[in-house]
Image: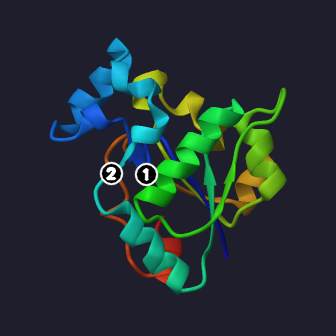
Amino acid sequence: MKMLVFTEGTLLMHRNGLGVPREERVRQVQRGDPSLRDWRSYVPIGGSPEKLRRWRDQGAQIFYMTSRKAVRDVEDIGEALKVHGFPPGELIFRDGLEGYGDVAERLMPDVLIEDDCESIGGETEMTYSRVSAASKRRIKLIKVREFGGVDHLPDSLSELMARP
């Protein structure tokens, strides 16, 4: 099973988001908190590294997708994933004029886990909203609240895939 998981807002957050409620994290993004651009200092949301390890241990092939495009920024997100113990997986990103939907369709995962993009405009900004109708029939979307993490999702891949 190929699993594509969005990084920023779904698995990782800016360091100033630590210790504040989810709603305040959203407001921090909307206000342009200074820690937002320090990609290397990003921290996991909840127990996301452990959750992804459980899924990997059941056979999921993990792919990460970042919103970053500049090579240095992508490397910094990759370093944050590594430092915080996320399971190994390819970090993919938009190249050139590609959009998020293009990247997802290039990979064609079985499941896409991403946040609802509350701080930047909502569902219209989500990757899933940018894939074709045919791809939507092939990709299962698991939508989580921005900065809400993935801890609440089932540990079992079969239960995850059975979610409506």
Q: Which residue is drawn at 52% across and 70% down?
A: 87
Task: Report the residue that reaches farthest toward the bottom.
Answer: 58
Say what amino acid the circle numbered 2 marks: Ile
Colour pattern: rainbow
Instruction: Find disc 2 in the rendering and name its residue.
Output: 45
Q: Position of residue 30 (x, y in %)?
A: 36, 17
Judging from the image, what secondary structure is the residue with disc 1 in?
A: loop
Mark 1: few/some/many CA within 10 Å (<14, 14-19, 20+): many
Q: Where residue 32 appears, x then y in whole percent? A: 37, 15
- At 39% from the left and 39% from the top, the residue drawn is 41
From this viewpoint, is residue 3 visible?
A: yes
**Considering depth in this image, is 18 or 147 the residue closer to the camera?**
18
Which residue: 22% across, 40% down?
18
Q: How crowded is mark 2: few (under 14 residues within 10 Å), some or many (20 or more)?
A: many
Secondary structure of the residue carrying numbered label 2 = loop
Q: Mark 2 near mark 1, Cβ–Cβ under 8 Å? A: yes
Which corner quadrant of the image does residue 93 belong to? top right
Alpha carbon distance from label 2 to label 1: 5 Å
Query: Is 40 situated left or right of 133 in this image?
Result: left
Q: From where the camera sits, is residue 67 visible?
A: no
- Quadrant where the image shows the N terminus: bottom right
Residue 102 on image: x %, y %: 80, 41
The percent position of residue 163, horizontal first and vertical second, equals 46, 69
Identity, as a three-letter code, of the amino acid under mark 1: Leu
Q: What residue lies at 39% left-to-right and 70% top-to-bottom?
A: 51
In the image, residue 37 sits, relative to residue 116, either above or below, namely above
Relative to 5, 100 lies left or right? right
- Which mark is first along the chain, 1 or 2? 1
